[in-house]
Image: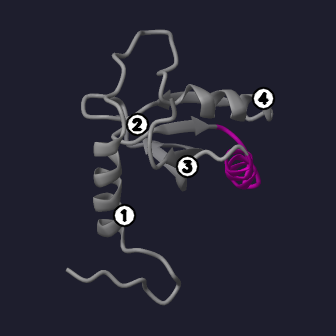
């Protein structure tokens, strides 16, 4: 199978997922979740973001059976906060995969948000 970068230099989403799955095989297994504690594989990212004044509210080191399939930190902020979060993570050499601006839909079909999610290529131990 040949994979070519598209005109903007980006890999198609299915290729990124495959690459992420291959990288996941190289990392240690996820730690068991402990209620009230930050997962070990995402703790470093949460710490760096909070030190930079970014208000995080949810995180997960990612795996089957976890809240997210990939290491993710969710945080609040305006339109500039997402870019600042990526800059903080890159400054510390953290393996950023993507930045997302999301809205959740409540059971009453009401939108809530937006909020940010930053995902990482692998757990950080």
Residue at the limit of the structure toward the front, as seen here: 26
Q: Position of residue 114 (x, y in %)?
A: 59, 47
The answer to whether residue 19 is magenta is: no
Indicate whether 91 appears above or below 41: below
Where's residue 119, x and y in %?
50, 47
Q: CA distance from mark 4 to mark 2?
A: 31 Å
Real-space Cα separation, disc 2 to disc 1, in angstroms: 29 Å
* Left or right of residue 41: residue 18: left
Q: Residue drawn 45% across and 43% down?
A: 104
Local packing at callout 1 (Cα closer than 10 Å; few below 14, some 14-19, many 20+) is some
Residue position for label 4: 51
State the residue at coordinates (25%, 28%): 65
Kindly check if marks 1 and 4 are in contact, taking CB atoms under 8 A apart as contact.
no
Q: Do residues under tags 1 and 3 come within 8 Å of each other at their CB atoms?
A: no
Give whichever of discs 2 and 1 has the lower sequence position: 1
Q: Position of residue 79 (x, y in %)?
A: 72, 55
> What span is colored magenta in the figure?
76-91
Task: Using the image as rendered, state which of residue 116 and residue 2 is in the foreground.
Answer: 2
Nearest to N terminus: mark 1 or mark 3: 1
For the residues bearing labels 4 and 2, Cβ distance under 8 angstroms: no
Which of marks 2 and 4 precedes in the sequence?
A: 4
Instruction: State the SS at label 3.
Output: loop
Q: CA distance from mark 1 to mark 4?
A: 30 Å
Seen as rendered, the residue at the extreme bottom is 7
Q: Report the residue at 67% width, 27% height from top.
A: 47
Q: Quadrant of residue 69?
A: top left
C-alpha separation, residue under disc 3 versus residue under disc 2? 31 Å
By secondary structure, the bulk of the magenta-drawn segment is best described as helix
User: Between disc 4 and disc 3, whose residue precedes?
Assistant: 4
Residue holding disc 2: 106
């Amino acid at each position: 199978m040949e994979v070519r970068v598209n005109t903007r230099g980006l890999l198609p989403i299915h290729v990124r997922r495959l690459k992420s799955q291959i990288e996941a095989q190289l990392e240690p297994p996820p730690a068991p979740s402990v209620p009230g504690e930050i997962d070990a594989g995402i703790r470093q990212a949460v710490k760096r973001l909070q030190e930079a004044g970014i208000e995080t509210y949810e995180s997960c080191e990612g795996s089957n059976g976890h809240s997210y399939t990939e290491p993710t930190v969710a945080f609040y902020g305006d339109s500039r906060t997402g870019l600042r979060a990526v800059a903080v993570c890159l400054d510390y050499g953290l393996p950023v995969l993507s930045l997302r601006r999301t809205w959740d839909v409540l059971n009453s079909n009401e939108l809530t948000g937006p909020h940010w999610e930053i995902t990482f290529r692998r757990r950080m131990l």
